[in-house]
Amino acid sequence: MKERTPRQMIVEKALNKLGFQTELEVLFPPFQADIVCYELGNGGVIFEIDGEEHRKRRDNKRDEFIMNKYGITRIIRVPNEIVDEGSEKLEKYLKEQIQLGE
């Protein structure tokens, strides 16, 4: 298991502030998700904090595998830049992605 990153903890805190319970570093063998919120969607929603190390084509295959095998409803990618811009912008981004009303 990877160690939690500061960005993961920031996103987790923002999701908790929005009223969602989360789990960090959840295994979906052979993959691992940054953050999972099981109360969103029918099977849960994964939040991936994405930096430069992510490769779109590989990530798409990984996402499809996890969604099909584990019943995850959706995977939301949170760019590092959004996390780094501060809690207000991060919460706005998360609300938009989750489609929560203001």
Image (cartoon, rainbow, N blue to C red):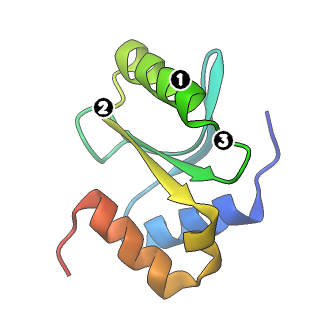
**Quadrant of residue 98 within the rendered picture:** bottom left
Q: Nearest to the eye among marks 1 and 3: give it.
A: 3
- Vertical position of residue 80 compared to residue 1: above or below: below
Q: Quadrant of the C terminus?
A: bottom left
Q: Are marks 1 and 3 in contact (CB under 8 Å)?
A: no
Identify whether 12 is placed above or below 18: above
Question: Of the residues tagged 1 and 2, which is closer to the observer?
Answer: 1
Q: Disc 1 and disc 2: Cα gap in Å?
A: 17 Å
For image coordinates 55% across by 36% down, the residue present is: 56
Q: Pointer 2: what residue?
A: 43
What residue is disc 1 on? 62
Are there few (<14), some (14-19), or many (20+) residues within 10 Å of tag 1? some
Between 26 and 53, the one lying in front of the other is 53
Give the SS element for disc 3.
Answer: loop
Task: Give the crowd class for mark 3: few <14, some 14-19, many >=20 residues within 10 Å.
Answer: few
x then y, percent, for residue 40? 29, 47
**Residue type indicated by callout 3:** His
Residue 54 is labelled as 3
Of label 1 and label 2, which has the lower sequence position? 2
User: In which quadrant of the rendered view does residue 57 lie?
Assistant: top right
The secondary element bearing badge 2 is classed as loop
Quadrant position of the N terminus in the picture: top right
Q: Is residue 100 above or below residue 46?
A: below
Q: Amino acid at mark 2?
A: Gly
Closer to the camera in the image, 67 or 54: 54
Badge 2 or badge 3: first in the primary sequence:
2
- On screen, residue 28 versus residue 71, left or right, reads right
Mark 1 residue type: Arg
Tell me the residue at 46%/67% (across/down): 16
